[in-house]
């Protein structure tokens, strides 16, 4: 995930967006109250997801121990070395903080997998602490009444399979365009090979078959997958798991006072992600995408400090800022997925727990989850 902090000031709810002026494009014969939109999931199912309101994003893995968010993928496997791992404690903290769902980074840029995968040896099965972190996470979520979700990063510096990952490309924006012959003279944009895409499909199937059902599956850096494979993997997942949200990150762009959705970067997706971004004005979830009116909810994703992964010197955001962010999202019907990274011991430290509980107290009954 990239570290770009924007302040959301537009009447729109979800992130990962390229939306222009809304138009009435659907002619319907049904009464207005039963109006249908073009998104895959029903409006009712998306509203049920919006009712979750508040969740915990958990960035944990190899980067926790390296002190780098975007490592080169070459770290020895034993660099991952929790000394007192307690996944149940993470979920208890989320529950005590008033959260209703949680999303764990199963695999991030380092490529190390927090579950035993039959498609690589670079996983927890080959660590001294061989806990199946994804398995424990899902089990504890269900046990403690938290809806589980999984994050999977398309950018993988360990398993590139001859792909050109973003840190090796000097033309990141080139991935947004349909190339023509003239682009052969430019530096290549990041891309993934069919070999990598086969690997990614197999790992996603493995995660969903072993740990589903989930509330959402979150794919980061989808720009490098290309329009064709991105559409393929979205359809592949949703055909098997039609009730689950599939969310592609990094579709948002700010243009003046408008939030735009970049379809060529993150479509298809069931929600708009607002990375390091929050809603301080009413959000209108009705967007026009591909010429069709679409109900498009949003999720604000910010860290409790400044970093996504644990860093010793990271400091919690001022409480006034956390309250402002939270109020802005809740009042404008944008989900708030707050990142709370465990430390190197494998637990969420008190420096995060104390402000989480204070935030819960300040928010009061606004956190009530609709049943």
Image (cartoon, rainbow, N blue to C red):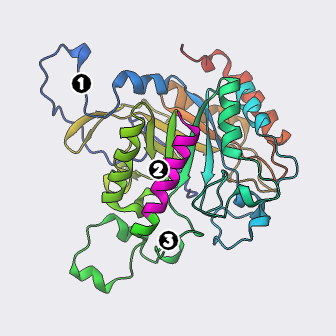
Q: Kindly state the secondary structure of the residue where label 1 is placed.
A: loop
Crowd band around label 2 with a 10 angstrom C-alpha radius: few (<14), some (14–19), many (20+): many
Of residue 24 and residue 281, the one placed in the foreground of this image is 24
Sequence order check: which comes first, mark 2 or mark 1?
A: 1
Q: Image height check: is 220 above or below 356?
A: below
Residue 69 pos. (x, y %): 66, 61
Q: Image height check: is 249 above or below 95?
A: below
For the magenta stretch, what is the residue range?
Answer: 197-214
Say the numbered circle drawn on residue 295.
none
Q: Kindly state the secondary structure of the residue where label 2 is placed.
A: loop
Image quarter where the N terminus lies is bottom right
Sequence order check: which comes first, mark 3 or mark 2?
A: 3
Sequence order check: which comes first, mark 1 or mark 3?
A: 1
Q: Which residue does the numbered mark 3 point to in the structure image?
A: 165
Q: Main secondary structure of the magenta part?
A: helix
Q: CA distance from mark 1 to mark 3?
A: 39 Å
Say the numbered circle drawn on residue 249.
2
Q: Residue furthest front?
A: 118
Indicate yes or no whether the magenta region holds residue 201.
Answer: yes
Res 255 visible: no
Indicate yes or no whether the magenta region holds residue 26.
Answer: no
Q: Residue furthest right?
A: 83
Residue 210 pos. (x, y %): 57, 41
Q: Which residue does the numbered mark 1 point to in the structure image?
A: 36
Q: Kindly state the secondary structure of the residue where label 3 is placed.
A: loop
* Left or right, 346 with reference to 341: right
Q: CA distance from mark 3 to mark 2?
A: 16 Å
Q: CA distance from mark 2 to mark 1?
A: 25 Å
């Amino acid at each position: 995930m990239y570290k770009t902090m924007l302040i959301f000031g537009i009447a729109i709810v979800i992130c990962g967006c390229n939306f222009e002026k809304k138009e009435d494009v659907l002619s319907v014969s049904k009464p207005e109250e039963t109006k249908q939109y073009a998104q895959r999931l029903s409006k009712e199912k998306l509203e049920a997801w919006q009712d979750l309101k508040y969740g915990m994003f958990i960035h944990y893995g190899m980067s926790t121990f390296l002190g780098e968010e975007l490592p080169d993928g070459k770290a020895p496997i034993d660099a991952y070395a929790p000394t007192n791992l307690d996944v149940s404690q993470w979920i208890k903290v989320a529950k005590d903080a008033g959260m209703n769902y949680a999303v764990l980074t199963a695999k991030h840029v380092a490529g190390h997998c927090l579950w035993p995968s039959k498609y690589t040896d670079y996983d927890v099965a080959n660590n001294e602490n061989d806990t199946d972190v994804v398995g424990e996470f899902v089990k504890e979520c269900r046990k403690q009444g938290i809806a589980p979700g999984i994050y999977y990063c398309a950018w993988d510096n360990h398993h590139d399979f001859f792909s050109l990952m973003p840190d090796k490309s000097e033309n990141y924006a080139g991935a947004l365009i349909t190339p023509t012959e003239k682009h052969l003279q430019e530096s290549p944009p990041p891309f993934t090979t069919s070999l990598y895409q086969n690997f990614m499909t197999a790992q996603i199937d493995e995660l969903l078959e072993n740990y589903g059902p989930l509330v959402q599956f979150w794919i980061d850096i989808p720009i490098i997958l290309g329009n064709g494979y991105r559409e393929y993997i979205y359809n592949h997942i949703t055909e098997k798991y039609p009730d689950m949200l599939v969310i592609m990150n990094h579709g948002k762009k700010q243009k003046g006072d408008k939030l735009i959705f970049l379809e060529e970067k993150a479509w298809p997706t069931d929600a708009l992600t607002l990375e390091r971004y929050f809603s301080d004005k009413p959000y209108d979830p009705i967007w026009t995408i591909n010429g069709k009116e679409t109900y498009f909810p949003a999720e604000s994703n910010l860290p409790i400090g400044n970093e996504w992964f644990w860093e010793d010197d990271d400091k919690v955001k001022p409480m006034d800022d956390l309250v402002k962010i939270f109020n802005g999202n809740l009042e404008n019907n944008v989900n708030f997925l707050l990142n709370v990274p465990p430390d190197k011991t494998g637990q969420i430290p008190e420096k995060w727990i104390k402000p989480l509980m204070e935030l819960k107290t300040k928010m009061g009954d606004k956190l009530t989850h609709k049943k």
